[in-house]
Amino acid sequence: MSDVEVSVVLPAYNEEETIEGTVGVTLEALASFLPPESYEVIVAEDGCEDRTPEIADRLAREHEAVRHVHSDERLGRGGALEHAFRESRGETLVYFDTDLATDMAHLEELVESVRSGEYDLATGSRWLPDSEADRPAKRGVPSLGYNRLVRLVLRSEVRDHQCGFKAFDREALFDLLADVEDEHWFWDTEVLVRAQRAGYRVKEFPVAWDPQTDSKVNIVRDVLGMGSQVVRTWWQLSVSPRVTRRVSLAAGTLLVLLALALMTLYLDPSAVLARLGSADPALVAASALVYLLSWPLRGIRYRDILAAIGYRERWTFLTGAVFISQTGNLVFPARAGDGVRAYVVKARRGIPYPSGFASLAVERVFDLLTIAVLAGTVVGGLVVTGEAGTLATALVGGVGGDTAAAGRTALVVAAAVGVAAVLATLLIVASARSERNYARRLVTRVSSDAYADYVAGVLEQFAGDVQTVARDRGAFARVSATSLLVWSLDVAVAVVVMFAFDVALAPGVLVAVTFLAVSVGNLAKVLPLSPGGVGLYEGAFTLLVAALTPVGAVTALSVAVVDHAVKNVVTIAGGLVSMALLNVSLTTAVEESRDVEASPQD
């Protein structure tokens, strides 16, 4: 059994000029208050590019109490500390920065606070009233702002989270590390915040602090990265535990009710009901048949996407999977049905979850791209036929007032999203022929922490899957063609419903405005605020049609309600049939897919 009680870790990255002196001072300070052989000093060398590894090896040979823990690649500040702590032997774990910015006269208080059993964690502080800290403005101002942000958002009682002078009880630390995700500069903060939330005893005491070298923190990149980690930790600790399925469903329902209540301020509900009753039932039924035709195309498109990434399945089965996933999006909030599709193809055909989620992401790209292409085609068609002037008049005049302005704003937003989708797709297709990793280069310009690395990995996988389809010209052409047909039929449903309400508009304007209204309505549905986007779709559709045409708001809302209802009824009916044929429980699928989304590689 080891006699080591205290393990001191010195995180070292390119410290050839200082590491030997730091180790000497550390050994001397520990020997002043601890028995011989009761402590060890570990140089946590983090993928250094200078002579630090060789110096650390020599120090380990010369001093029995010194050990060298090496990493071939850069682990990050938190990752290197965690790696060294796991290799340590003491029950009290300590670390401090190798520049010895904190006066070593405080080391005994730091160690004994935890070693005595009085506290589970201890940290020095540069922001307590009795602290003595010489802080240049370029470091002090960001540090003060950051710590105030953490105290406010994460409800921490600690004043200085980033001081590199900390001690931990071994059992407490490793209990916390099970949930700590960051591996870089935010590691300290996350440990302290989670320790307070878990009820561990944390001591913060004033220290004398004088920086000996320039900080290795990149003020812009690393501060932004830590900011994203603050948001992530806040979500995990304060929001996620409260966002249950029941709460989400209730919130979505309240949102829909609120939207409907606000509509009654400028629309007469009785007038809307009367207008709904005037629709031609034969044309409404015809619109349902038109929409039904789009579903085999969805299955065929999904088949081609899966085939491009290496999985061949029958379009009939995949049509059922799409039906079930879209039914899940109607029944559950936060687009829970998206994960259902990955579950169905995994449970029934053995397609791995990562491929299921990736194929769904590729499908979304083609949906956005198709909207943009159709929008350009419609506008171009109006120019060629000479009817662009009619649409321009509607844009300038329209209903007038705030409604017209809001409609024009919605159109601009839709156009911006479409242009962004086209540019993003062109960039991904172009990069498919390049060996450069644009996604990681872009993300790491902003931040280099573990969360940024995770984001870069997601973007790499996403871009890689789209590139896989883009490289296969046949698959790209087929998926593009079926996407155009799917969206054309989606717009055709609304056009038929327009006819059912006997809307009198020039054919070109009718098609153009209907497409724009359907597009913006579907963009509104992307926001996971209500099950199936009910209320969001109708509101966006009504706003745009009423703003851009002489069609009244009552008629526009009636068209939107019937159009959306027809599509939802067909979706749910197809979903129920598909669940019966494939023996899939929607509730089970949603729960299973949520578990997988937390760890998509399982």
Image (tube, helix red, strand yellow):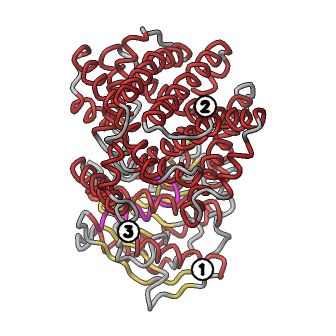
Quadrant of the image containing the C terminus: top left
- Disc 3 crowd, CA 10 A, few/some/many (<14, 14-19, 20+): many
- Disc 2 crowd, CA 10 A, few/some/many (<14, 14-19, 20+): many
Camera-nearest residue between 350 and 178 = 350
Seen at 48% across and 17% down, the residue is 297
Distance Cα–Cα, label 1 vs label 3:
20 Å
Say which residue label 3 marks.
154
Is 561 in the magenta? no
Residues rendered magenta in the picture: 182-196
Is 194 in the magenta? yes
Question: Quick one: label 1 or label 3, which is nearer the N terminus?
Answer: 1
Q: Tell me where residue 58 appears, x and y as whole percent.
A: 59, 50
Residue at disc 2, secondary structure: helix
Residue 295: which quarter of the image? Answer: top left
Residue at disc 1, secondary structure: helix
Seen at 48% across and 55% down, the residue is 78
Between marks 1 and 3 in the image, the one whose residue lies nearer the viewer = 3
Between marks 1 and 2 in the image, the one whose residue lies nearer the viewer = 2
Please indicate whether residue 397 sits to the left or right of residue 110 in the image.
right
Amino acid type of the residue that numbered disc 1 sits on in the rendered structure: Val
Say which residue label 2 marks.
370
Q: Tell me where residue 248 appears, x and y as whole percent.
A: 28, 51
Question: Quick one: label 1 or label 2, which is nearer the N terminus?
Answer: 1
- Disc 1 crowd, CA 10 A, few/some/many (<14, 14-19, 20+): few
Please indicate whether residue 446 sits to the left or right of residue 95 in the image.
right
Camera-nearest residue between 525 and 273 = 273
Question: Quick one: label 3 or label 2, which is nearer the N terminus?
Answer: 3
Say which residue label 1 marks.
141
Residue 54 visible in image: no
Number of numbered discs: 3
- Note whether 289 is above or below 407 in the view shown: above
Amino acid type of the residue that numbered disc 2 sits on in the rendered structure: Thr
